[in-house]
């Protein structure tokens, strides 16, 4: 096990953000002679698996990157992987852009299709890249691919059959984790607003539990909030209780639809058929209220005030953009419930036996230092390396006087790949 740090000391919350480059790549860093091709495979459950393969020719190792809700077509690490002498396949998820149909159990089929496709193209070594929400997906895939016959998942979190025991899930050779949170359910449980009292009323509030009340320790930026341990304990309990309430709502919706289908089968009236076909959705408001984003003394780091959605919690709590904003009952239980989401590093990381590199950004306001430390401890591999690099969640610079974290991450990844896997000749 190796742990290194390239972290200059930065006073928390003071790094300017204006003028920083976005979260995507710099095309000028792409090496001369690279080419891009569209590749299409087929997942074991019959869904096409499509993506972009970046290569220079002659590579023996390929990196596969996929996020469950985003297409990483312009991921900033593409140039760095190519320059290291490996190819990189950016796979498009089937649930791109929303949570309505995302069930994490089916992402195992997708990753399996991508790995099989790359094996079929002749790559000798396959390394998975899990960035942010892609990390628990890749950990889940590895855990399922290494599971003994008959021991894989048989249903989704809502009980729908998922035939993973019959699927081809080729094993992989390595794992890259960048900005790796512990899983979408655990992430949401930490940032959902525990002071909301009525899921049907986004303005309902228990002010004694609100992290945005001055009497509870809140201060407006740039001053850090200052919550007491007693408040944090009460608030964390309220967050867990809220997740459990939404779990119950989701399961009740599923049971209602199952009952309607059963009745419609026996007596197919228009009303019953409509009820059986109706897919309810869950509107989840106020999901950007992790106290650590506003009290910079909690699990201190180099992060700035605010969350990945910005420094204005009113906009991110009540606006249309945010975690888990619109879900089906099935996608809530599979993705955003800490109680039933199987894509979690505490559940899956102990099974990882492949060489693993964990890249932590020291100014990340979604993955905090204790989280990264916990993730590192969970990984079962004997060959595991943890590097800490200045940058925000997307690797962008912490300020004009600080290096771009994506450059540091790219160098660390390139070195790690070249030390462990066969690479193409003539890399630059």
Image (cartoon, rainbow, N blue to C red):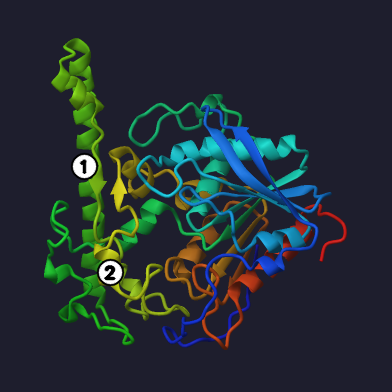
Quickly name the residue at label 2: 315
Query: Which quadrant of the rendered structure holds the C terminus?
Result: bottom right
Task: Indicate the secondary structure of the residue bearing disc 2.
Answer: helix
C-alpha distance separating marks 2 and 1: 28 Å
Q: Provide residue 333's location: percent of width, then percent of height.
A: 32, 42
Q: Is residue 260 left or right of residue 63?
A: left
Mark 2 vs mark 1, foreground winner is 2
The quadrant holding residue 148 is top right
**Between disc 2 and disc 1, whose residue precedes?**
1
Compared with residue 315, is residue 39 higher up or lower down, i.e. above or below?
above
SS for callout 1? helix
Q: Residue 33: image x %, image y %?
A: 80, 58
Relative depth, front residue between 46 and 297: 46
Residue occupied by mark 1: 248
| Rendered view: 142 above or below 269 | below
In the picture provided, is 384 more to the left or to the right than 85?
Answer: left
Is residue 217 or residue 69 the one in the foreground?
A: 69
């Amino acid at each position: 096990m190796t742990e290194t740090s390239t972290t200059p000391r930065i006073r928390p919350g003071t790094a300017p953000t204006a003028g920083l480059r976005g979260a995507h790549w710099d095309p000028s860093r792409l090496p001369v002679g690279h080419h891009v091709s569209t590749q299409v495979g087929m997942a074991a459950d019959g869904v096409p698996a499509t993506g972009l393969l970046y290569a220079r020719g002659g590579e023996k190792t390929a990196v596969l990157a996929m996020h469950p809700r985003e297409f990483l077509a312009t991921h900033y690490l593409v140039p760095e992987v190519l320059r290291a002498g490996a190819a990189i396949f950016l796979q498009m998820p089937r649930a791109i852009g929303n949570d309505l149909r995302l069930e994490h159990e089916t992402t195992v089929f997708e990753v399996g299709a991508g790995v099989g496709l790359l094996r079929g193209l002749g790559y000798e070594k396959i390394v998975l890249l899990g960035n942010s929400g892609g990390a628990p997906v890749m950990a889940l895939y590895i855990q399922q691919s290494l599971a003994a016959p008959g021991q894989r998942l048989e249903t989704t979190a809502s009980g729908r059959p998922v035939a993973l025991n019959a699927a081809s899930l080729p094993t992989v050779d390595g794992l890259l984790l960048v900005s790796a949170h512990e899983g979408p359910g655990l992430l949401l449980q930490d940032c959902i607003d525990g002071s909301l009292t009525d899921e049907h009323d986004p303005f309902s509030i228990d002010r004694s539990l609100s992290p945005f009340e001055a009497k509870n320790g809140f201060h407006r930026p740039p001053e850090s909030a200052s919550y007491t341990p007693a408040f944090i304990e009460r608030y964390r309990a309220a967050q867990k209780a809220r997740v459990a309430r939404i779990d119950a709502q989701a399961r009740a919706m599923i049971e209602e639809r199952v009952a309607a289908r059963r009745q419609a089968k026996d007596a197919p009236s228009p009303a019953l058929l409509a009820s059986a076909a109706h897919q309810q959705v869950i509107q989840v408001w106020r999901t950007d209220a992790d106290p650590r984003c506003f009290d910079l003394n909690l699990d201190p780091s180099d992060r700035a005030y605010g969350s990945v959605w910005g420094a204005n919690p009113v906009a991110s709590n009540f606006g249309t953009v945010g975690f888990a904003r619109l879900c089906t009952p099935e996608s809530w239980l599979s993705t955003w419930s800490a109680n039933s989401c199987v894509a979690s590093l505490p559940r899956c990381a102990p099974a990882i036996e492949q060489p693993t590199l964990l890249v932590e950004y020291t100014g990340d306001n979604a993955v905090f230092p204790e989280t990264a430390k916990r993730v590192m401890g969970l990984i079962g591999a004997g060959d595991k390396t943890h590097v800490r690099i200045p940058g925000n969640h997307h690797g962008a610079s912490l300020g004009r006087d600080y290096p771009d974290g994506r450059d540091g991450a790219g160098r660390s990844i390139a070195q790690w790949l070249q030390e462990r896997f066969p690479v193409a000749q003539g890399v630059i």
